[in-house]
Image (cartoon, helix red, strand yellow):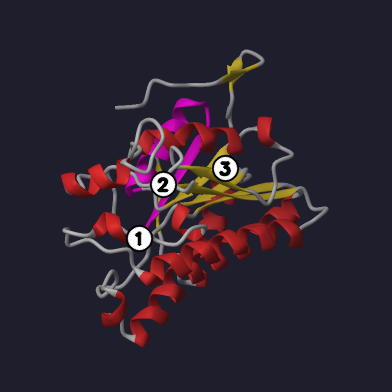
């Protein structure tokens, strides 16, 4: 079901005819982003490493840790659409050992997960930025996290089987720095790079965890996936054309 929320500017939908590549389109946030982009007049191009022949939108299977796959995304979309206005990276590549407690993490797993996740974001940002440089404009939006700007609140995990992976903290803080670096590096090329750092997104977490998490928030508490869409649409639109190199936190005050 397509989300029935849209934004208008000068009588047209705010993303009218903008071609937007969404990497990690089959994930919790990615799938919500795709629907919101479509509902606001954009042309979403879905990219994920899982097969999805039943997608209602243009779909490309790709692995962002492989340069050839990233270049194929660019070539595919450019040939079919003639342009790319923006890329949104919400992918979450990780290996089978991801998410262990700090003392149980093997060095090789730590390195592999940083290479896959942070490295994948680097590769996408690098290749899309170079494409945008030749095109004369472009917009990069990376999804980071509040745990890229504050230390974990380990107490909210007590009594559950959950933890806050050390890899996640390093990756998300790295994504924020990478995004700022790109924004500064491409000064003068009409390329924007920004981050969104969500707080916790409800996804059937244990009730005790949600209760503890919500005690740090100011109003709603843990967010639903749709709560990020408004900020994404704003950053994709021309209304935010002078916002560059920023990290926008959406967490109902959890990080305060």
Estimate how packed mark 1 is, as few (under 14), some (14 to 19) or many (20 or more) residues with alpha carbons within 10 Å: some
Give the spatial CA distance, label 2 vs label 1.
25 Å
Percent position of residue 108, x then y? 36, 86
Percent position of residue 254, x then y? 42, 44
Q: Which residues are magenta?
A: 26-48
The residue wearing badge 2 is 199
The residue wearing badge 3 is 81
Q: Residue at 45% across / 26% down in the picture?
A: 39
Q: Secondary structure at mark 1?
A: loop
Q: Residue furthest right?
A: 188
- Residue 69 visible, this orientation: no
Relative to 119, residue 252 above or below: above
Q: Residue at 46% across / 48% down in the picture?
A: 255
Q: Is residue 118 left or right of residue 176?
A: left
Query: Residue 49 has which mark?
Result: 1
Q: Earlier in the sequence, mark 3 or mark 2?
A: 3
Q: Residue at 74% across / 39% down in the picture?
A: 242
Which quadrant of the view contains residue 109? bottom left
The answer to whether residue 146 is magenta is no
């Amino acid at each position: 079901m397509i989300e029935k929320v849209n934004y208008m500017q000068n009588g047209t939908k705010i993303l009218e005819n903008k071609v937007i590549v969404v990497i990690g389109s089959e994930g919790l946030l990615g799938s919500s982003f795709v629907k919101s982009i479509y509902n606001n007049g954009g042309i979403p191009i879905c990219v994920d490493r899982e097969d999805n022949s039943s997608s209602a939108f243009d779909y490309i299977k790709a692995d962002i840790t492989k340069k050839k796959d990233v270049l194929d995304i660019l070539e595919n979309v450019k040939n079919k659409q003639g342009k790319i206005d923006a890329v949104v990276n919400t992918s979450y590549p990780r290996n089978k050992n991801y998410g262990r407690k700090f003392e149980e993490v093997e060095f090789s797993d730590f390195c592999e997960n940083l290479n896959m996740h942070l490295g994948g974001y680097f590769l996408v940002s690098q290749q899309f930025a170079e494409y945008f440089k030749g095109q004369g404009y472009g917009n990069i939006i990376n999804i980071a996290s509040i745990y890229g700007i504050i230390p974990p609140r380990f107490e909210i995990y007590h009594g559950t089987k959950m933890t806050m992976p050390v890899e996640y903290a390093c990756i998300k803080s790295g994504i924020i720095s990478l995004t700022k670096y790109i924004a500064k590096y491409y000064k003068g090329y009409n390329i924007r790079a920004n981050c969104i750092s969500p707080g916790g997104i409800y996804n059937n977490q244990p009730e005790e965890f949600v209760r503890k998490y919500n005690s740090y928030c100011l109003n709603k508490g843990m967010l639903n996936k749709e709560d990020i869409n408004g900020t994404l649409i704003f950053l994709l639109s021309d209304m935010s054309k002078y916002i560059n190199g920023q990290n926008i936190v959406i967490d109902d005050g959890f990080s305060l």
